[in-house]
Image (cartoon, grey):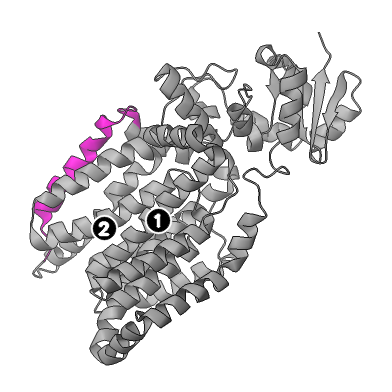
Amino acid sequence: MKKNILSLILIVIVCILIVPKELQNDTFYLIKIGESLCKNGISQIDSFSFHNLTYLYPHLILCYLAYFAYSSLSFFGIYLLTIVFTIILGITLFIINNKITKNNLLSLIFTIITIVLLKNFITLRGQIVSYTIFILEYYFLDKLNITNNKRYLIYLFILVLILVNVHVAVYPFFWIMYLPYVGEYLYNKVLKKDTKINIKLIGISFILSFTGGMFSYLGINSYTYLFKTLTNSTTIYISEHQPLILIYNGVIILMFIIMFYIINNKKVLLKDKLLLLGLGIMTLSSNRHKSLLIIFELIIINKYLTKYLTFKYKKVICFFEEKLFNKKNFALSIVIILFLFSPYIIYNINTDYINSSLYPIEAVKYIKNNIDYKNKRIYNFIDFGSYLMLNDIKVYIDSRTDLYTYSYNHYRDIYEEHRQLVYGNIYYEDIFEEYNIDYVLLYKTNIVATYLKHDKNYTMEYEDDNFILFQRNII
């Protein structure tokens, strides 16, 4: 127990240090939607853009939590909430690793490695919750299959209910986690081998998880949300949806090398091989799945490596465990962690919650003080649309990209229009005229800003180091 507590203390310290203070645009719209939900309830029509589109709520519970944190402690509250979710993720990783391997030291090491590798994915988005859900699902499914204890059916169903109300876009991945069990069962049946897969309980659990989507506000849309995301134009242009380019991902190259070794190892269970193979394919098809490959490959590596090391070098591991968890060395471990993570500490100390080069902080102040923005239409870039939302300025587009695609709104592909305009592929005036745009807020470096500077029908209203605001004078 003492070793577990000390391990958790080290993990909590790492989790706190790894969370970035700087916020990103998805967090802004979570806050604003949460505010609207608390004050006005659920509405069918989006009130944050001037398109009057039908809006679904894929992060319903997270929106409430984000607004509660923000209304309580402003951006510091959001930072604290992100830390809390990261700590929950880290603690869950350690507990599950420890339960699987029965080895405190190696579980601690692999948990810290996992958290560090996930650094770029740590932010207040749905994934910060869904990672924890999938880790628990992996463990509960295994326990359901091994013990035949039906209480795990309840645990798995509870996880589904949380997932569909926090991050519905990844709901189908919950079902995918069942496929390795089905694959191993069918493989053994075909070869007429004895199988350790309790396909009846696994099947019941799958059916229960499949019905979970009906307990979401989205209802039937819970089942189609991901498909619509994968088939709209955002997957072509948004980096996290694009196929992985291995040459720029050294860590993932290493993960693939290790994965091939695991797949060829006869001592590894087929269901674990199938899970890694599926995650490898998903990772190659989309950058966003790197995080899942990191999480589960490291859990599986720890699972089998610990079994090997404790068989061969049990005394050595016990020796290092005893050394690490005495008072002197534990204190030294904290000092080492603080030293190794000092760049993160320094970065957070010297960083604001909002990056003024990415978000138009001063331009928004100017708009709110000098323009009748509630009755005017402002064209904006997608990158900072959510920040305008946060400041009660209706947007042309924001980082809820799915909302602005035809597959969702059945109105028009606003996202594609925006992309074409940003790259100067269509005439800006055609878009501005169609939407009755009054003002245009751009990054100074964008090509459209250059055009507008030389267009007599546009007057520059505001300019700073990064942003420029034009008034459109055409009647």
Q: Earlier in the sequence, mark 2 or mark 1?
A: 1
Instruction: Say the numbered circle drawn on residue 138.
Output: 2
In the picture provided, is 446 more to the left or to the right than 120? right
Please report the residue visible at 53 percent of the width from the left and 39 percent of the height from the top: 27
Q: Quadrant of residue 4?
A: bottom left
Task: Identify the residue at the far front of this view.
Answer: 327
Nearer the observer, 453 or 262: 453
Disc sitting over residue 162 in the figure: none
The label number, if any, that marks residue 87 in the structure image: 1
Instruction: Measuring from the top left, give residue 332's x and y in whole percent.
Output: 47, 79
Residue 295 in view in this figure: yes
Magenta segment: 196-221
Q: Position of residue 458 (x, y in %)?
A: 86, 21
Q: Residue at x 82, y 41 (%)?
A: 465
As displayed, is residue 323 above or below residue 71? Answer: below
User: In whole angstroms, how far apart are the C-alphas of marks 2 and 1?
Assistant: 19 Å
